[in-house]
């Protein structure tokens, strides 16, 4: 069971203020906090870090630091002729984000989890599977 809230970006001609991330909520019997942002790319070999905004990174970093689960759901819509979705822990994004000034400005596709989902409704099942080791 989960309660997940979508956060709309307040817009009136121009963006009125920065939002945090796309979704926040609680999951499971212990009410574990979960936050994620949804991104997409047409790239076929990597996810450009320019798709992330500083305030989103800071929010997810903080969420993770205080014990919540923080993810970026990334859609590669041009990979192998069909869409691939990755449930990516913020730690993988931060590995590249924190070193982007030293070189690489993208996350290679090969660094993403081996598990990918083609249906959005499978994300919570994947989360449950990945966290069934007693972390909650």
Image: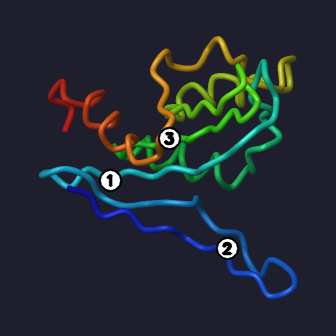
Q: Is residue 18 above or below residue 50?
A: below
Residue 132 in the image: above or below residue 29 = above
Residue assigned mark 2: 9
Mark 3 Cα within 10 Å, few/some/many (few <14, many 20+)?
A: many
Q: Give the side of residue 136 with respect to residue 76, left or right.
A: left
Taking the spot 29% from the left edge, 58% from the top edge, the residue there is 26
The numbered mark, 3 or 2, whose residue comes first in the sequence reads 2
SS of the residue at dot 1?
Answer: strand
| Alpha-carbon span between mark 2 and mark 1 | 21 Å
For this rendering, which residue is in front, 54 or 83? 83
Which quarter of the figure has residue 8?
A: bottom right
- Crowding around mark 2 (Cα neighbors within 10 Å: few <14, some 14 to 19, many 20+) is some
Secondary structure of the residue carrying numbered label 2: loop
The answer to whether marks 3 and 2 mark residues whose Cβ atoms lie closer than 8 Å is no
Along the line of sight, which residue is nearer the eye, 38 or 84? 84
| x 19%, y 39%: residue | 136
Mark 2–mark 1 contact, CB under 8 Å?
Answer: no
Q: Quadrant of the N terminus?
A: bottom left
Location of residue 118 in the rendering, given as x and y in whole percent from the top left corner: 51, 35
Q: Circle 3 sits in a helix, a strand or a loop, which is it?
A: strand
What is the x, y in percent for residue 78? 76, 30
Disc number lying in front (2 or 1): 2
Q: Which residue is mark 1?
A: 33
> Disc 3 marks which residue?
71
Q: Residue at x 70, y 28 (%)?
A: 98
For the point 65% across and 11% down, the residue is 110
Could you tell me how far apart the alpha carbons at marks 3 and 2 are, in whole angstroms? Answer: 19 Å
């Amino acid at each position: 069971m989960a309660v997940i809230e979508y956060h709309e970006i307040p817009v009136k001609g121009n963006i009125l203020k920065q939002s945090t991330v796309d979704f926040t909520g609680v999951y499971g019997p212990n009410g574990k906090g979960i936050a994620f942002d949804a991104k997409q790319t047409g790239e076929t070999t990597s996810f450009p870090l320019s798709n992330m905004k500083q305030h989103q990174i800071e929010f997810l970093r903080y969420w993770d630091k205080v014990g919540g689960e923080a993810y970026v759901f990334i859609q590669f819509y041009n990979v192998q002729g069909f869409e691939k979705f990755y449930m990516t822990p913020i730690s993988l994004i931060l590995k590249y984000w924190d070193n982007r000034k030293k070189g690489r400005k993208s996350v290679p596709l090969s660094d993403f989890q081996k598990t990918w989902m083609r249906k959005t409704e499978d994300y919570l099942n994947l989360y449950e599977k990945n966290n069934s080791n007693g972390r909650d």
